[in-house]
Image (cartoon, rainbow, N blue to C red):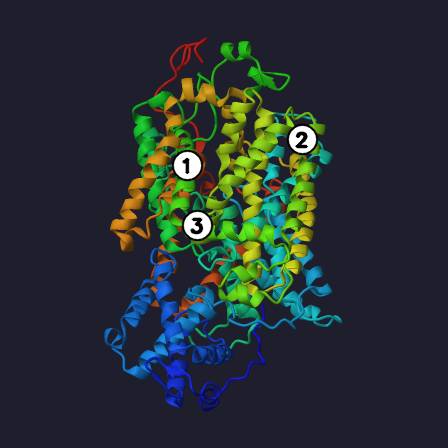
Amino acid sequence: MESKQNIAAVSAQELAADVAEKDAFELELPVPAEEVEAIRDTLRRRLGEFATEGVDDSDKIAYLTRLALELTGARALEILQRASADHADDVNFPEHTMAHILELVGGPAVAGLDLVAYDAAVRAEATLIDSFSPYPEVRSVIDPFDDPSIPVETVRAYVLGLIWVVIGAFVNSFFAWRQPQLKLQSTAIQLLLYPCGKLAQLLPDWGVTMFATLMVNVGASSSNFMNYVLIQRLPVYYGQEWVSAGYIIVLNLSSLIVGFGWAGLLRRWVIYPSRAIWPTVLPTLALNRALLVPERKTRVHGWSISRYRFFFVCFVGMFLYFFLPDYVFTALADFNWMTWIAPTNLKLALITGSFLGMGVNPVPTFDWSVINYFNPLVVPVFATVNNYVGMLCGGVVVVALYWTNYRWGAYLPINSNQLFSNMGVKFNVSRVLTDGLLDEDKYQAYSPPYMSSGNLVYLGAFLMMYTLSFLYTLATEWPMLRAAVRSFWQGLRNRKGSTYAQYGDPVSRLMTRYKEVPDWWFLALFVVSFAMFLAGVLTYPTKTPWWAIIVTTLVSFVMLVPITLIYAITGFDLRMNNLSSVISGYMLPGNGNANLMCRLIGINTDIQADTFVSDLKMAHYAKVPPRAAFRAQLLAVVVQCFVGVGVILFQIDNIENLCSSTQKDKFTCAGTTTIYADSVLFGVIGPRRVFDRLYPPLKYSFLIGVLIVPPMLLLRRWFPRQMRYVHPVLLANGAASWGSSYNLAYFTPGLYASLAFMWYVRRRYLAWWSKYNYVLTSAFSAGVALSGVVVFLAFEYKSVDLDWWGNTVSRAGVDGSKAGAILAIPDGGFGLRPGTY
């Protein structure tokens, strides 16, 4: 996305001459020069609220001034009235802007302006909404115009894009199993792409644009399917030796692409509507603009350093600093200092511990990879606070269940994603299987799987979230959903018509000049990849019938629209993990492998669709031709597939104790273990046993999700201003954060960072925030990721240990052992009696 630099600034007199005889609300008068200048000043002030400091926006102002003068007063007021209704409950629409619009709609007297100033204010505000974007954050990172002559699909862009897809996919795939993960984010890669692009200018090609960034954004990540490879292959889980390289390639490629087909249909719901702003793509767009638009040297609250220099200073600083918490002084990463006071005190460890406990610790880490666990400098602060409050509420429930020994939780660790036998040791699934299926006699002779109190809250909150998210989103976003359904139906009836033409937002109007990607392209890709997935599942001994895959896919698609819409509005990526597991468990009880395959296709329908859609939204903002974006995404995913396969095969063969809870290099596979536990519960054991015998209250979680919706809707109606910042789905998502090796120690520091940068700095030092915030988080994340690679290859992989107090104190006590419970296991075990489970 490059600014259209050839749009010359126009003088006030020239603009006035162009639009002579325009009405001035009440009177048909030529527009005087003073009014033109008033509009220009108003636009300059409004754009300056979130302006990218140091970048010359005169071309934007000149362009928008011309459009504002072409608006009639009646049309401008109509736009503002519609905006006040459309964004009344929009949490991303600024409150002060809404108040300003309501004043303008009320007339000059209400707004407290004379006729000239009022005319300028109305025209300017209407132009920003109708011809740019209603959201200042979006206006700061895109242009209201487009230059179709800028080259996009160039050889240079493809080459650089593919190189960095390989690098990013390698780093992110390699550290996907680490706790916490180390991620090389697309924004960081984008900053590293820039000097490569400048160097490549020596080649006989045109300049590198947003195109390479689109490839990196969708391809430089880890594959969710590799979780399932580890679960099936490693002896710590199912230990199935038949999992081969061919099996991994076929299912990885097909599961990566299958969500691409759904992404095309989702365009109408979560790409074209302006309300779907996608906060997570704005940092990339902001950096792209900062790099490509010439930057003037300016001082921002005393800071004059350029963004690019600021990035490399922060990058080098974090690269060097990360050696401390990752290798030299690891207690800084897991700073469970409260347990050092009494290392053998179990109750202290259960509440404050970073490993065994709840992580109730005001200062739990000095490690950026922990602080940045959920992107606190990107996600809107209201979403972060909702998530954290939900986690606090869920934590209270966890403690209450544990100390009352509800469903035998007090015999186990308080917050673990492992499953346990009735003797308090890890549940050995191989003892209840025969030929990969549940053996009833073995099961009754061994034990049912029991879960921790934290895991029980996690499951309950997740199951509740399915019905809650579907119904709440349906109720609150019905107008947009209805319009999208109507658009899809019209598209089927008129396949040669333009989908963009059905949307009135400014970006869609500009995109009408490009050829769209027909729906049948996406559907064809889905059919091919889905057939490939079915072929892989049926060819290899997964014991999964074809019809179960189809049923799971259809149900998952029903949930796809609401969760993607929540992601587009809030920036929090919800996961419908367990729905596929529960459905598969009812269809195919006793079959863990089939449960994994159904869960895989179900969640990858969600994950990959979200990934592609967010990338398509970025392309939409950047005005990249849709068919070029389509080709870039597809190629990047194919490359990502083979990089991921190579990484996982290397790790399986070379990393000792991979996915063990005590793995020395933190490759503990926390998320993988959660998936495995769910497959045992709902696949091997089956939801009927879980809901009817082991944990009966869990089945009411679906009903609770339904019952929450009506009172929340009433509260939104009675207290619209206050409740616009309360999102029940995010609260439930926070409660579902328990039940793993992650606890408050991973969320508290992120809350501090979010409040500091996304609230305080953003409000008090907006110019600094606009210029440096996204650069800061990108630089720190890149420094951590690359430093982690160096530390692992130079020291950890070669077993070069640094044995001293700072590297042993955090794991020396009860908390570090990750084992302990307040009740001792009775003779003969605890729980249900044999023959009753």
3 or 2: tag closer to the N-terminus: 3
Along the horizontal axis of the image, is 319 left or right of 200?
Answer: left
Q: Are marks 3 and 2 in contact (CB under 8 Å)?
A: no
Neighbours of disc 1 within 10 Å: few (<14), some (14-19), many (20+):
many
Kindly report the distance in space between the C-alpha atoms of the residues bearing marks 1 and 2. 30 Å
> What residue sits 38% from the left and 50% below the top?
384
Q: Are marks 3 and 1 in contact (CB under 8 Å)?
A: no
* Residue 311 in sight here: no
- Where residue 763 sits: x, y (%)? 34, 65
1 or 2: tag closer to the N-terminus: 1
Q: Which mark is residue 371?
A: 3
The quadrant of the rendering that contains the C terminus is top left
Kindly report the distance in space between the C-alpha atoms of the residues bearing marks 3 and 1. 31 Å
Neighbours of disc 2 within 10 Å: few (<14), some (14-19), many (20+):
many
Question: Which residue matches tag 2?
Answer: 537
Residue 754 position by quadrant: bottom left
User: Which of labels 3 and 2 is toward the front?
Assistant: 2
- Where residue 139 sits: x, y (%)? 46, 68
> What residue sits 52% from the left and 30% below the top?
581
- Where residue 803 sits: x, y (%)? 51, 40
Q: Amino acid at mark 1?
A: Thr
3 or 1: tag closer to the N-terminus: 3
Q: Residue furthest right?
A: 204
* Secondary structure at numbered mark 1: helix
Question: Which residue matches tag 1?
Answer: 467
Up/down of 564 relative to 463, above or below:
below
User: Which of labels 1 and 2 is toward the front?
Assistant: 1
